[in-house]
Image (cartoon, rainbow, N blue to C red):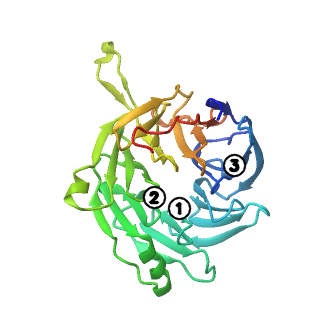
Amino acid sequence: MAPATQFEVAQPPQDAISALAFGPGTSRRLLVSSWDKNVYLYEVSNNADEATLVRTFEHRAPVLDVCFGASPDEAYTAGIDHQVKKIDLATGDQTVLSKHSEAVRCVVFSAQHSLLISASWDCTLHVHNISQPSQPPLAVPLPGKPHALAASPTKLVVAMTARLVHIYDLPTLASAVDSQQPPQPWQQRESSLKFLTRAVACMPNDAGYATSSIEGRVAVEWFDDSPESQARKYAFKCHRQAAPEDEGGGDVVYPVNALAFHPVHGTFASAGGDGTVALWDAEAKRRMRQYQRFPESVAALGFSGDGRLLAVGVCPGFETGMEDYSGEGRTKLFIRELGESEAKGKGSK
């Protein structure tokens, strides 16, 4: 493989990026959701030196999350208009799968179980069996407002307010859709981080997950609740900058907005309000590299299914306040083609 290269996408969203996701497998398709009420579909060229805007899908309100379904022609969105939608990317047709009573914060698709799960600020999950479209979704009540959602091959991790973390067993959720009886969480935990959870991502090997907070920290935990496994969990500071001495010194602390595990090597990337992206080896507990600073806060990031590409969504954050906020002209999308061993950790085979 050629050395790593990076380019800026020519037609980015008009306002802040809320989420991005690559298509399944070796797909070079990339979906980006935005506060400008659109979802953007891009196709990355085979030699990874440009990305073409294929089409946009307009929504009634800002879109807070997006994911692909079972194929590169199927997408799902979470909207501030309370709706969970399915988009046929080939025809542009949009179908409302369910409606929450508040904004929908997250959507995640489990290919192994044909489940689409949405998490809303109305404190519920909706679990949709995609293989049975006529079946109503299962509503699962939550004890707090969800802020982040992620799925591993067999688990679903829901991070909520008040440091609550619920872990659900996906096969149990799949069978509960038929009975319409919401199951209890497989595990209930308290976050290792003292401040609000901003992002969660699951390890591709189904062993555990990472969470990040608004206070410049990341925690890595394992699903196995044995004392030995729980003793392995750890947290660390990141995405911080030294404050000028004439301002009293110390650290300027930024939120860690996004996390993504590499699908092949199991290392993970973090992105923060400081405009940086870092790669971490979860097993060796070390930072592998930090990339050159981006022009604004990094809002979202994701690896392609084959692990060769890393997409980075950049836009102004609220680190300097919300007055006169505008992402227009300052929202950018970058795609990096990784070098052969760039994301390979010390413990990787």
What mark, if any, has residue 149 been given in the picture?
A: 2
Are circles 3 and 2 on residues that touch, CB within 8 Å? Answer: no
Q: Position of residue 42 (x, y in %)?
A: 72, 47
Badge 1 is on which residue?
A: 108
Residue at point 52%, 50% (across, down): 263
Q: Is residue 196 left or right of residue 86?
A: left
Is residue 104 left or right of 31 when viewed as pictured?
left
Question: CB under 8 Å between callouts 2 and 1?
Answer: yes
Question: As shown in the figure, which amino acid type bears the numbered disc 3?
Answer: Arg
Q: Is residue 32 left or right of residue 138?
A: right
Task: Calculate the distance from the C-alpha at mark 3 to the C-alpha at mark 2.
Answer: 24 Å
Residue 4 percent coordinates (x, y): 61, 31
* Label ID, residue 28: 3
Q: Amino acid at mark 2?
A: Leu
**Nearest to N terminus: mark 1 or mark 3:** 3
The N terminus: image quadrant: top right
